[in-house]
Image (cartoon, grey):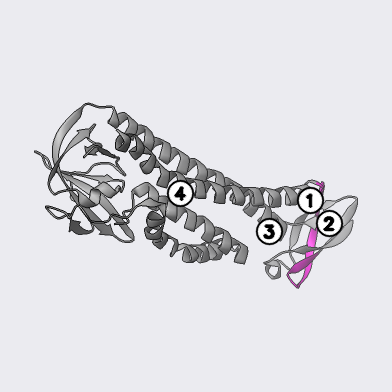
Amino acid sequence: MTSQTSQPVRALRHGALATAVVLFVCLVVAVLSWLSYSEDRALLSSLTAREVGEVVSFSDGAVEVRWPSGTARVAHENGDRIVGRQTQVAFDPANPSRAVIPGADVLVETDRALGGVTFAVAVVLLVLVAGAVRVVLSARAARAAPVTASVRRIRLRSGLMVRSWLEIDGPVERWLPVYYDPVLVTLPSPVSVELRGGRVAVAGGVTLYPSGRPVTKHPRGRRLDNPARPDPETRAPRGLLAQLRVDAVFIVPAPFVGLFWAYVDGSGFVGWITATVVAAALGLWWAAFRGSDPS
C-alpha cells in the first residue's frame, strides 16, 4: 500500500519542481518588464502636445527634431535614415525638450517591455494548462477498470531525450510512454501488468503514469530493451538529483536560443540573458513533462 500511495508523489514531484522553476523565472521576467513598462509609460503619458516637425540631424544615437514651438534631442537607433524628413512630434507642453517621434528608442523599449509581460503570462498559462490536462487525463484513466496485458519496457533515445516506453502486446501492438520510476529498471521482459484506461499501468504494486499518449506506430529513436531477467540487485537511479543531471542536457541549447532571440528582437545583452534563462527553464520543464529517463 505504501508504494502505491507514494508513487503519485514521485510522479508529480519532478514535474512540480520543473514547473516551479518556470513560474519563478516568468514571474521575475514579468515583474522587471512591468516595472520598465510603467516607467516608460509614465514618461509617455506626460507628452500630451502634438505638432509636425523636422528631423534636422543625427549624432551619438539621437536625432535633433525641430518644430514651430520647440526643439529636442530624441534617442533613435535608426535616426540616420530619417534626417531631413518631416515627422509627428509628441512633447511635454511644460517642457518641450521632452519629446518623442515614431520609432524613438523609448517607444521600442515600451513595446518590448509590454511584450515581455505578455510572453511571461503566455508561458505560465501554457505550462499550467499542459500540466493540468496531463494530471486530469492520468487521474481519469487510473479510475478505469483494470485489464491484464503483457508488456516489455524499452528505452528510446531521440535527439536529446531518453524516455521509457511500455511495448504492449495485443491484437494491435501499442507503445505507451511512461514517467520514470526505479521499478522500470528491474522489470522483467515481458511482464504482466494491469492497464487502466489504456494509459496507466500497475506493475508490482507500482503505478506507472503516462508521459504522453499511446501510439500504434513504433516511436522513433535508438532502442534499448530491458533484459528478460534483469538483476534484481541492480541499483536504479533515484531522487531528483539523478533526474536533474540527465535533464541538464536541455539547458545546453539555451544560450544559442538567447542569441537568436537577441538578434531578432534587437534587445542586446539584456535580451540575450532573459531569453537564455527562460529557454533553460523551459528546457528543464520540457524534459520533465515528456518524462526523461535517468537510467
- Residue displayed at 82% across by 53% down: 91
Pointer 1 or 3: first along the chain: 1
Give the alpha-carbon distance from disc 1 to disc 2, as whole Å: 9 Å
| Residue 198 in the image: above or below residue 237 | above
Instruction: Note whether 295 is above or below 6 in the view shown.
Output: below
Label 3 CA crowd tier, 10 Å (few <14, some 14–19, many 20+): few
Extreme-left residue of the structure? 171
Q: Which mark is residue 43?
A: 1
Dot 2 corresponds to which residue? 98
Q: Which of labels 4 and 3 is toward the front?
A: 4
Q: Viewed as shown, does residue 239 lie left or right of 175?
A: right
Magenta extent: 46-64
> 220 above or below 38?
below
Q: Earlier in the sequence, mark 4 or mark 1?
A: 4
Q: Are marks 4 and 3 in contact (CB under 8 Å)?
A: no
How far is mark 2 from mark 4, CA to CA? 45 Å
> Of marks 4 and 3, which one's residue comes earlier in the chain?
4
Report whether residue 27 is seen. Answer: yes
Q: Tell me the residue that label 3 is attached to.
A: 103
